[in-house]
Image (cartoon, grey):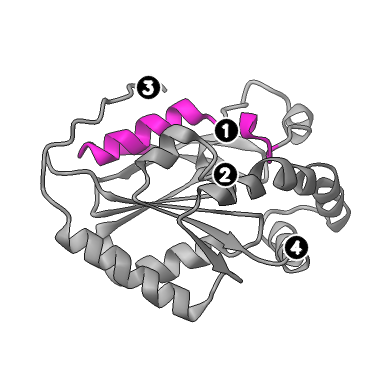
Amino acid sequence: MTSPSFVLGIAGGTGAGKTTVARDITDGFDETVVHLPLDNYYEDRTDLSFSEREAINYDHPNAFDWEFLRAHVQQLCSGRPIEMPQYDFETHSRTHKRVRVEPADVLVLEGILALYDEVLTDLCDLRLYVETDADVRILRRIRRDVLERGRSLEGVIEQYLSTVKPMHEQFVEPTKKRADLVVPEGTNAVAIEMLTSAVAEARDTGPETESEAPLIEYDD
């Protein structure tokens, strides 16, 4: 069994540019990179009605299936493929579709609370927090949710004020203290260049040793 992947954790508020940072850092690595969006690991709430699912606070840590995510990260780090779940934002539910993900040199865990869980944070070789002004983040959130996820403008604003903003202040922003580096404004070119070089060097020079990390089995 080969050594664990180089695990990169990228956290930050909604609309901060986390996905852009992940893509910019790993763009040149081709198939040697695996991207695990935290959004795919929301709890499976298909047993609830649409109105009940719609009322869930998706920015609270309890909205995520941490046990499932831990198991998948450790399986990849141990050289075992996973069947990654897929999430439908329009229906607020996990779909029946799965995407097979093979182990790779670099594993990117990205999401608002990517640095929240201590087990996952400890597995990360490098932890980033993307920091972007709140007014920029809310504008990006509105554009994404209205254009891509079929939400109404009024609904997006109401959700932001009632759950997104308070949850950011209570749970997301405090994870910044766990970051090795804080990346300003999401697409800072100098930061991206430095991080890309750091990941490439770590990937290329990492020792090929047996992984002794315990496996967490999860029956989906």
- From the image, which quarter does the C terminus lie in? top left
Labels 4 and 1: the sequence-earlier one: 1
Q: Nearer the viewer's eye, disc 3 or disc 4?
A: 4
Residues tagged 2 and 1 counted as in contact (Cβ below 8 A): yes
Q: Is residue 159 left or right of residue 186?
A: right
Q: Is residue 35 above or below residue 191?
A: above
* Secondary structure type for disc 2: loop
| Amino acid at circle 3 | Tyr
| Amino acid at circle 2 | Leu
| Amino acid at circle 1 | Phe
> Which residue shows up at 76% across the image and 61% down it?
138
Labels 3 and 1: the sequence-earlier one: 1
Structural crowding at the residue carrying mark 2, measured as other residues with C-alpha within 10 Å and reported as few (<14), some (14–19) or many (≥20):
many
* Residue 155 visible (yes or no): yes
| Mark-to-mark CA distance, 4 and 1 | 23 Å
- What residue span does the magenta drawing correspond to? 58-83
| Mark-to-mark CA distance, 3 and 4 | 37 Å
Residues tagged 3 and 4 counted as in contact (Cβ below 8 A): no
- From the image, which quarter does the N terminus lie in? top left
Q: In the depicted view, which residue is nearer to us: 154 or 91?
A: 154
Residue that carries the numbered disc 2 in the rendered image: 113
Residue that carries the numbered disc 3 in the rendered image: 218
Residue that carries the numbered disc 4 in the rendered image: 134
Labels 2 and 1: the sequence-earlier one: 1
Labels 3 and 4: the sequence-earlier one: 4
